[in-house]
Image: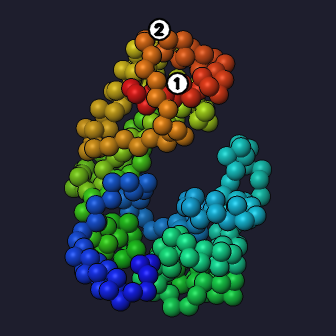
Amino acid sequence: LLGLAPATWAIARELYLEVAGLPLVCPHGHTDPRWFAENEAFADPTSLLITPDHYLTRMLYSQGVPMEALGVRPLADVGGVAVVAEPREAWRTFAAHYHLFRGTPSGLWFNHELAEVFGLTTRLTADTADAAYDHIAACLAEPGFRPRALLDRFRIETIATTDSPLSDLHHHRRLADDGLAGRVLPTLRPDSVVDPDHDGWAHNVERLGVLTGRDVTRWSDYLAALWERRQYTISLGATATDHGHPSACTADLDSAAAQQLLDRALAGTLDAAGKEEFRGQMLTE
């Protein structure tokens, strides 16, 4: 990655050896707290490594591979009528297109996983797909590949999950009871209740009101409800929030103007500019 000059290699090796043995601190883990709380074996190679990784699926989608072929169900498929590939078939599709990742960060990362974590020594192709799938599935069935064992194997000092403000965080309470408080931390991801473009936003805001006992149709109570959920997440160890704003737009409205935005958002009458202004106000808040 750092060119062909031998002097560069020497510097790279020196820098790497400075940090290679240090524990990992992972503040942006996007991991599921259920993994660590229940500590069950991961289901299969595809649902672990392919379908949840939007860096992989979006790139292949850009090259004409349907999401359904990769095991990803479309968000709009509420009734579950879409034909979605089974895990092994989705893995075969991924392997047949794996050459498209040559020279990309995703390809380098995935190669490292295959070789260093799972011990695979053959290149992933359409011809080797089934053998690789079976090998990884066998690994995942071993106790050493359970989530808590991997925390130790990878020397993970701290890792953060990503959590909705609507979550009761019961997995984190269980982790605290099991002595993992401070090692697996929650991170508040409030998009579902602060972005009017989010699927089911108005319903999510209503649930926020029920959860906190506040009239979230009022701007002051809406903010107070969000504050309460933030404080609850902090009480279980959170040190950060994670926001998916599509732009860095900010707004600094008075409470009357903000209330009007909230009213229109809940009524479903905000246009694109209004939604952006609402998100901008929430980014400021």
Considering every residue shown, the one lying at the far top of the view is 256
Crowding near the residue tagged with mark 2, few <14, some 14–19, many ≥20 C-alpha atoms within 10 Å:
few
Marks 1/2 in contact by CB < 8 Å: the verdict is no
| Label 1 sits on residue | 278
Q: How far is the residue under mark 1 from the one under mark 2?
A: 13 Å
Q: Note whether 255 is above or below 146 in the view shown.
A: above
Relative side of 1 to 182, left or right: right
Up-down relation of residue 63 to residue 115 (above or below): above
Relative placement, left or right, of 57 versus 178 is right
Q: Of 148 and 241, which appears nearest the observer?
A: 241
Judging by the rendered image, the residue that carries numbered circle 2 is 256
Q: Amino acid type of disc 2?
A: Ala
Amino acid type assigned to the residue bearing label 1 in the image:
Phe
- Determine which quarter of the picture holds residue 39: bottom left
**On screen, residue 96 above or below 49:** below
- Residue 284 in the image: above or below residue 180: above
Say which label, 1 or 2, has the lower sequence index: 2
User: Which quarter shows the C terminus?
Assistant: top left
Which residue is pictured at 65% across the width and 84% down the height? 125
Residue 53, position in %: x, y? 55, 61
| Residue 88 seen from this side | no
Given residues 31 and 210, the one toward you in this image is: 31
What residue do we see at 44% from left, 78% from top?
A: 1
Residue 14: x %, y % from top left: 25, 81
SS state under label 1: helix
Q: Residues within 10 Å of mark 1 (few under 14, many from 20)?
A: many
Residue occupying the point 56% across, 91% down = 122
